[in-house]
Amino acid sequence: MTVEKLQLTLHATGLKNIAGLGKGTSDPYAIVTLLASGPGEKPRILGKTEVIKNSLSPKWTTSFLFDYSFGKETHINVSVVDEIRKQSDKTMGSAVFEIGDILGSRGSTKAKTLKRSGILYARISKAPPRSAGKLALRLRGIKLKNVDGLFSKSDPFFEIRRTHDGGAGGGSWSPVYRGKHMNNNLNPKWEPASIDVNVLCDGDLNKRIQVAVYDHEKKGKHNPMGAFDTTVNELVKSVGGKFELKKGSKTYGTIAVDECKIVGAETSSVMQPPSAPAVATATAPAAASYQPSMMPVPVPVAGFGNMNLGGQPLPVPVPPPKKPTFVDYVSGNCDLNMCVAIDFTGSNGDPRRPGTLHHFSPHGQMNGYEKAISAIGGIVAKYDSDQQFPVYGFGAKYDGVVRHCFQVGNSREVHGVAGILDAYKGVFKTPLIMSGPTVFTEVIQLAATQAKQRYQINPLSYSILLLLTDGAVTDVEATRQVLASVADAPLSIVIVGIGNADFSAMQFLDDFETRSGVNRDIVQFVQFSAHEHNKASLTRATLDEIPDQLVQFFHSRGIMPQADSNFSASKIVIDDYNEEADIDLSMDYGSDGEIALNGDVGCYIDNSYEAGIGKLHVMPPPTAPSGSAPVMAASVPAQPFTFQVQVPPNVTSGQQIQIAHPQTGQPLIVAVPAGVPPGGIFTVSA
């Protein structure tokens, strides 16, 4: 699994003042807690920001580091707290964010309205390496303009800010350092500053940064005294020199650079401007026009006899020397698209009968297809900018003809994962006759064609086909040939086997790359029954290879991540307060400044299949009766339950294997029963 280190920064606007009548303005700080993903885990406080005195719109400079992987949901709780002397600090509001939601949003920024008042903003960026050193900086102000009125002098302090617009400056700025103010002084000699170069400019010494000066006000509404844009390289070269402090077109004084040097940097860590173009020119012949018709008329698939989608592969320019990561791309204007293909062959059984694979329970339990769509689609959809998804079916008859690719739903695309589920259910209201055989080739060809069409419009477009089936493909060789023919498309294919059929014939998908002779693996096959009781396990298994596949495609063609030049703060989507999820966590504040969660079990996100799409349920810790033993979380089953396990390919009956309990995550050692072959399925009660 690809794991990357990310960095979280926070700011808020319009908080409610809870200091009390006659006690001035609140002094907010934020506490970040990594929530547990199930009752067998515990939440963990990542830390807290600095306190911003007398401010209802704080911009904290403290950042928080944590691990991220594409196939795992990671939730954080951010509590905004007012620091109060001689009594307990008071909560000003809390919000829960999912890291994928933030990363997939414009500017990698997400915002939430707090319960009392105000908006909390969370931004994710790639954590820089730890070897670019510190910027040792000493600044001095000369004849700064007084902005404090006729009868007093300004109390200036300076901020150092980084940009989030790709380095050009003039976009979204965030403070990374804030110095102490100097009372009544228009010629201040500020204290030396030490700033992490990676945090300031991602190690790129030519990236634009900003120095801003403010007149400190006790009420927190600091008056701007001017600013100037520069780079770390310019500052280092300007020791002994000066910069004009500008406010609009007017000069508000001069800033002298008395000292500026980088301490403790490794030479290899200092980034230089890229020599390769940000996006290499990539042209391809026009892909065949291919649009599905409205239901119930099936999609006619034609023009794919040679299985090369236009006849010529996409050109492969020489890749640039520095290889970006998955996070670089998804936060660098990459457009991730998803389409879904569903198996309607007769082997799924009569959907009107309970226990069959397409049966819809009147009691709300999801069938395997619904679970796979909600789990996998729920993660991938976070990175799709327009939330519009094409849905296809295969293996059913319309008008007496077997269709291996037809439109599911009343429109070419449906909105959101909920729209996919609605379209899936609605197909049984059409004159569909479940049939066979199981043929994937046409939906794979269609997905590849559409992926290439999007790529020609936007070279930073990438697609994922989620293909759900209950059985092995009928023609293995034809499927292998099609997969080889589309390996040059900006596409990954995730195939999930639903039900308890023998999927051993699908093993060819796992070694597709070596057998087909292509140098790019685009397929991942996973058997759903091995993850039926563990949503997180399913998403990890199915999406594990996507990041590497995406990076390999773009990097091999010299296509680099791009800054979103049209991004501005006005385009940040602000979500409403969620009464179920955005709860205030109970905290213990120690006299030594340490903060701990109140309670041993803590809170966790209900990440079960039945929790619902986009519905976060934060469970408070259970309360044990006085004098009794600790009570486990209510959702942990009191009695053993059964689940299915797939035998690894290299294990035979009688051998022991280690698995994770689907609900608690605890390791279990089980023996493979006699007669169960490698790749087979057996049932465990635990």
Image (cartoon, rainbow, N blue to C red):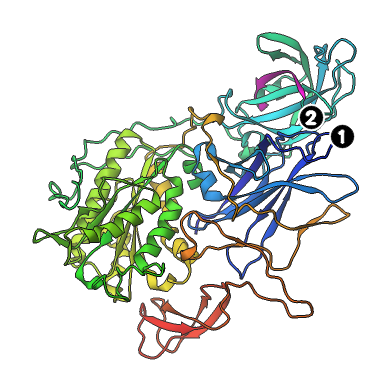
For disc 1, the marked residue is: 22
Q: Amino acid at mark 2?
A: Gly
Q: Position of residue 666 (x, y in %)?
A: 58, 75
On the rendered structure, is 466 left or right of 211?
left
Say whether residue 334 is visible.
Answer: yes
C-alpha gap between disc 1 and disc 2: 15 Å
Q: Amino acid at mark 1?
A: Gly
Q: Position of residue 355 (x, y in %)?
A: 32, 76
Q: Is 228 covered by the magenta stretch?
A: yes
Which is nearer the eye, 76 or 115? 115
**Which residue sits at x=59%, y=47%?**
6
Going by the picture, which residue comes out furthest to the left? 400
State the extent of the magenta-drawn residues as a range: 222-232
Mark 1, Cα crowd under 10 Å, few <14 / some 14-19 / many 20+, is few
**Which residue sits at x=38%, y=59%?**
373
Instruction: Give the answer, above or below, for where 112 lies relative to 520.
Output: above
What is the secondary structure assignment of the residue under circle 1? loop
Instruction: Give the answer, above or below, for where 163 lies relative to 476.
Output: above
Say whether residue 521 is visible.
Answer: no
Which label sits in the foreground, 1 or 2? 1
Based on the displayed image, in which of its 4 quarters is residue 151 positioned? top right
**Which residue sits at x=52%, y=55%?**
69
Q: Main secondary structure of the magenta part?
A: strand
Based on the displayed image, in which of its 4 quarters is residue 676 positioned? bottom left
On the rendered structure, is 116 left or right of 141?
left
Query: Do callouts 1 and 2 mark residues in contact (Cβ within 8 Å)?
Result: no
**Which residue sits at x=54%, y=72%?**
663
Q: Position of residue 205 (x, y in %)?
A: 63, 30
For disc 2, the marked residue is: 220
Q: Position of residue 555 (x, y in %)?
A: 42, 42
